[in-house]
Structure formats: C-alpha cells, structure tokens
Image (cartoon, helix red, strand yellow):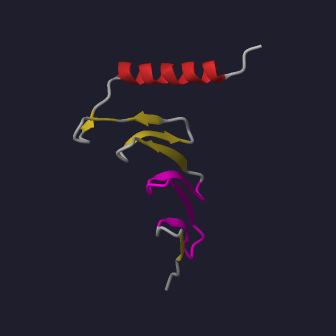
Amino acid sequence: MSKKIKKYDKKGNLIYSKTSYGFEEWSEYDENNNEIHYKDSYGNEYWSEYDKNNNEIHWKHFNGEENWYKYDENNGYINITEQEYKNIEFRKKEKEYNSRKKY
C-alpha cells in the first residue's frame, strides 16, 4: 500500500505532498486561496497572478512560457490576441525600466 504525506496551511490549502515513491509537490497561496506558486520534485515550477475577482490573469512556467488571460464584466474568459499580449509585455518592461533608480 502506498502512503502519501500531505500538509495543509491554516486555510486548508495543500502546501506539500509526497508519495511513497518520493515525488514531492509544494504550493503557495495568496490571501484569497489562489495558488500563486507551484513546484515539484521533477523540476516543474510555475507562478500565477490573479485579478481582483480571483480570475487567473497571468501564468508563467519556469521554462519561460507565459500565458495571459482576460475576462469580461461577467468574469467570462476572453481570448487575448497576440497584439494585446505584446502590449502587456511592453507595459511590463516599461514599468520595470521606469522603476529603476536614475542617476
């Protein structure tokens, strides 16, 4: 019989698990119980960001793959265009550049 170890945070979110075969998983959550960071013993790792309605708006994998998501006023998913993605990336880089100290 295989035994699995599971650990939860105070809100009941699974933060760690390990199978009897040695596979491990770790997760971190924000104040709204959204998973914001995941990592496993195979080397997978990803991060997620959420909007004020708890919709996932950005997902980034450790290999550099990124996905952006948009939602309508009813929280319905809207496909994002390549140009919208490029605009988001540009604004992100512009914000990073502007946040640097200027000498």
In the image, 22 versus 71, the foreground residue is 71
Q: Residue at x 49, y 19 (%)?
A: 90
Q: Magenta stretch containing residue 54, yes or no?
A: no
Q: Measured along the vertical axis of the image, is residue 15 above or below residue 55?
A: below
- Is residue 94 found left or right of 99 in the rendered image? left
Vertical order, 31 against 79 (above or below): below
Query: In the rendered image, which quarter is residue 96 located in?
Result: top right
Q: Nearer the viewer, residue 11 or 68?
A: 11
- Image mark count: 0
Residue farthest bottom in this picture: 1
Magenta stretch bounds: 13-42
Along the line of sight, the residue nearer the viewer: 86 or 61: 86
Quadrant where the C terminus lies?
top right
Residue nearer the viewer, 88 or 53: 53
Residue 7: x, y in percent? 55, 72
Residue 33, compared with residue 20, is above or below; it is above
- Above or below — where is 66 with respect to 16? above
Judged from this view, the residue extending furthest toward the top is: 103
Quadrant assignment, res 81: top left
Q: Position of residue 70 (x, y in %)?
A: 33, 34
Q: Quadrant of residue 41?
A: bottom right
Residue 58 percent coordinates (x, y): 44, 38
57 sits to left or right of 64: left
Residue 25 image point, x, y percent? 55, 62
Q: Residue at x 47, y 35 (%)?
A: 66
| Residue at 54% in and 68% down | 9
For image coordinates 57% across by 42% down, the residue present is 62
